[in-house]
Amino acid sequence: MPNWLLVFGPVAIALNHFAPGHYAPIFASAAIAILPLAGWLGRATEQLADRSGEGVGGLLNATFGNAAELIISLAALRAGLHDVVKATIVGSIVGNILLVLGAAMLAGGLRHREQHFNLAGGRAEATMLTLAVIALVIPAAYSVLVGERYAGGERALSISISLVLLAVYAMFLVFSLWTHPTFFLGAKASENAEQAQSWTLPRSILVLAACTVAIAWLSEILVGTVEPTAHAFGLSNIFVGVFVIAIIGNAAEHSTAITAAVRNRMDLSLSIAIGSSIQVALFVAPVLVLASLLVGPQPMDLLFGKGLLLAVFVAVVITGQVASDGRSDWLKGVQLLAVYLILGLAFYLTPQA
């Protein structure tokens, strides 16, 4: 995207400060400004992947890319909007593995007849997603079976599971970065032009950090305009949280994963899309549960509604199938996007509670 579009960033900030009631212009300006920033973020990620491997590059992109969701969720947590926080968490998980990975596989498959990724790494990430589903299902099952007899059990269970998930995520980082890094290695970029214009490591990290901060800032402004605009069209809170906010918050992952797939770097694309969902489920969600003990009017638990649990479950099931053979094509991308569209239609037609 042309860099001159960055001028819309200051425009969005100024409108948000001086004309906060003009939702549509603020939304459009912030969204346009995010596009070139996402492009720079993707370029910095590829430079880091060239130096440190696809696994590390994908992890860094997921970490910086999820900063927007974490900031937005903390703001909602302080306001006691636990339903919005939970919907955003689920939307980020589902959006990354269905929308981002699906779009990446479709774009890459249209350019390359068949693409391959490290099968061992793909299966390891799919297993971590299954663990995430289990961690979300157990509190709901506990609430149905035991909750009425033990009032404080749901909160204690949520805190305990959060600590377990954080420990497992730390072990997954050790596994993927130190003990088994070969599971997440992919092919290096072969374009001579890119190699000739290689960035230094400090420059790559600086660009990544700066773009992330700017995207997080603009995303927060944009989300503040999305909700009143969406509600004016009769959309439910859960639809806004799961789909609208999640799509905006994942703008950086969208751009980078699709660009990597088009350049036949499916390992990097997979690490960004699935790795981001893993990080949200095993790190961001537990951190928010623990943070709610100090922030907000009351603690948050891991009790997600049936619709949210079903969305995560079906997304993880089809992603496990897609990642089970180490190859991708455009049809797999269409299949993932179809599931995302079906879920979107179901939530769209869900009446406002």
Image: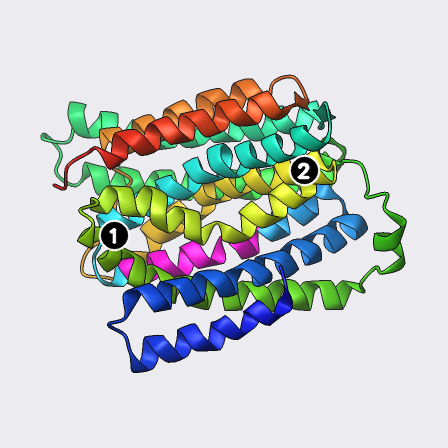
Is residue 125 left or right of 286 when viewed as pictured? right
Q: Identify which residue, 70 or 286, lies in the foreground.
A: 70
- Residue under numbered circle 1: 230
Q: Quadrant of the C terminus?
A: top left
The residue lying at 28 percent from left, 47 percent from top is: 240
Q: Which mark is residue 261?
A: 2
Residue 38 lies in what quarter of the image?
bottom right
Is residue 148 left or right of 202 when viewed as pictured? left
Q: Identify which residue, 233 or 76, lies in the foreground.
A: 233
Q: Is residue 214 covered in magenta?
A: no
Coordinates of residue 40 in the picture (x, y in percent): 65, 61
Magenta span dominant secondary structure: helix
Vertical relation: 137 (above or below) 2: above
Q: Is residue 139 visible?
A: no
Coordinates of residue 334 in the picture (x, y in percent): 52, 25
> In this rendering, which labeled residue sits more in front, label 2 or label 1?
1
Vertical relation: 120 (above or below) 1: above
The residue lying at 55 percent from left, 48 percent from top is: 253
Vertical relation: 134 (above or below) 84: above
The residue lying at 23 percent from left, 50 percent from top is: 82
Task: Please name the amino acid that badge 1 sits on.
Answer: Ala
Query: Mark 1 or mark 2, which is nearer the start of the sequence?
Result: 1
How busy is the neighbourhood of tag 1: few (under 14 within 10 Å), some, or many (20 plus)? some
Q: Secondary structure at mark 1?
A: helix
Separation (CA) of disc 2 from disc 1 = 32 Å
| Span of residues in magenta | 62-76
Coordinates of residue 84 in the picture (x, y in percent): 26, 50
